[in-house]
Image (spheres, helix red, strand yellow):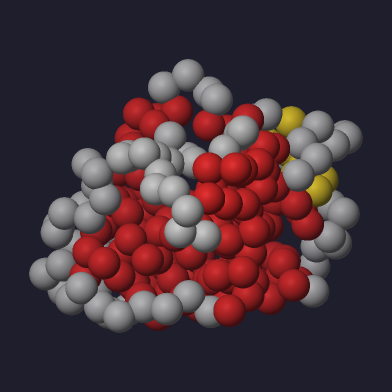
């Protein structure tokens, strides 16, 4: 199934990029207020958080698409401050061997997914969502933040095909859902530039 393959690819992409972090590289500046350790910790939550949501399944579906998930998640008050703080905490939780922690998280989530059906309903803070709709959100996070990591480490990185495709589709859906579809089409076809600082994720 495409979403599972994309998740496996994105996970492997993340793990292999983390492995390229030099021993003295964890405190390097990465993204915004985050160091490399913070960024890796935040991204690793895309692996570990699935088990927590699966352990508390919802009784029904409240979030019906991947794009709707992001819309609900990003509309929360002070969401970016909360994400920044959780990233720092997640970075510290990686412990003395961050690479091993990432490998263990990857192995654990892939094993968990082997026993889960696509229509399993995960219990998120904003309501229930099917695994098949939630998993692409993790592909999105893993793909984009692994590119952030590669840039901070100054290493070459090209997302795998399925992971890249899922990420681009989500961005297109988010642009449409957020009323930016025309702007995205015009920019991607070279007809118009996007405003400075434009972002679909705030």
Question: Which of the two residues, 9 or 97, is positioned nearer the viewer here?
Answer: 9
Q: Where's residue 38, x and y in %?
A: 29, 51
Q: Is residue 25 above or below residue 28?
A: below
Q: Is residue 38 above or below residue 76?
A: below
Question: Which of the two residues, 196 or 162, is positioned nearer the viewer here?
Answer: 196
Q: Where's residue 35, x and y in %?
A: 21, 52
Residue at horizontal 33 percent and vertical 35 percent from the top = 85
Residue at horizontal 22 percent and vertical 41 percent from the top = 33
Q: Quadrant of the C terminus?
A: top left
Residue at horizontal 35 percent and vertical 29 percent from the top = 81
Residue lying farthest to the left in this orientation: 24
In the drawing, does residue 123 fall left or right of residue 168? right
In the drawing, does residue 1 fall left or right of residue 101? right
Question: Which of the two residues, 162 or 102, is positioned nearer the viewer here?
Answer: 162
Q: Is residue 5 above or below residue 132?
A: below
Can residue 89 be seen? Answer: no
Residue lying farthest to the front in this orientation: 191
Can residue 177 be seen? Answer: yes
């Amino acid at each position: 199934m495409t979403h599972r393959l994309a998740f496996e690819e994105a996970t492997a992409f993340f793990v292999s990029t983390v492995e390229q972090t030099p021993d003295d590289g964890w405190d390097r500046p990465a993204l915004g207020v985050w160091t490399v350790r913070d960024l890796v910790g935040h991204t690793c939550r895309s692996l570990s958080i699935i088990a927590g949501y699966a352990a508390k399944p919802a009784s029904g579906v409240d979030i019906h698409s991947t794009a709707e998930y992001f819309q609900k998640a990003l509309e929360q008050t002070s969401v970016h401050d909360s994400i920044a703080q959780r990233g720092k905490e997640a970075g510290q939780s990686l412990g003395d061997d961050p690479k091993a922690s990432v490998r263990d998280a990857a192995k654990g989530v892939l094993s968990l997914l082997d026993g889960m059906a696509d229509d399993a309903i995960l219990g998120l803070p904003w309501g229930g969502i099917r695994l098949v709709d939630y998993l692409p959100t993790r592909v999105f996070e893993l793909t984009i933040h692994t590119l952030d990591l590669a840039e901070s480490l100054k290493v070459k990185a090209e997302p795998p095909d399925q992971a890249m495709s899922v990420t681009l589709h989500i961005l297109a859906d988010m642009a449409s859902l957020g009323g930016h579809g025309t702007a995205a089409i015009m920019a991607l076809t070279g007809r118009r530039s996007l405003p400075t600082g434009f972002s679909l994720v705030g």
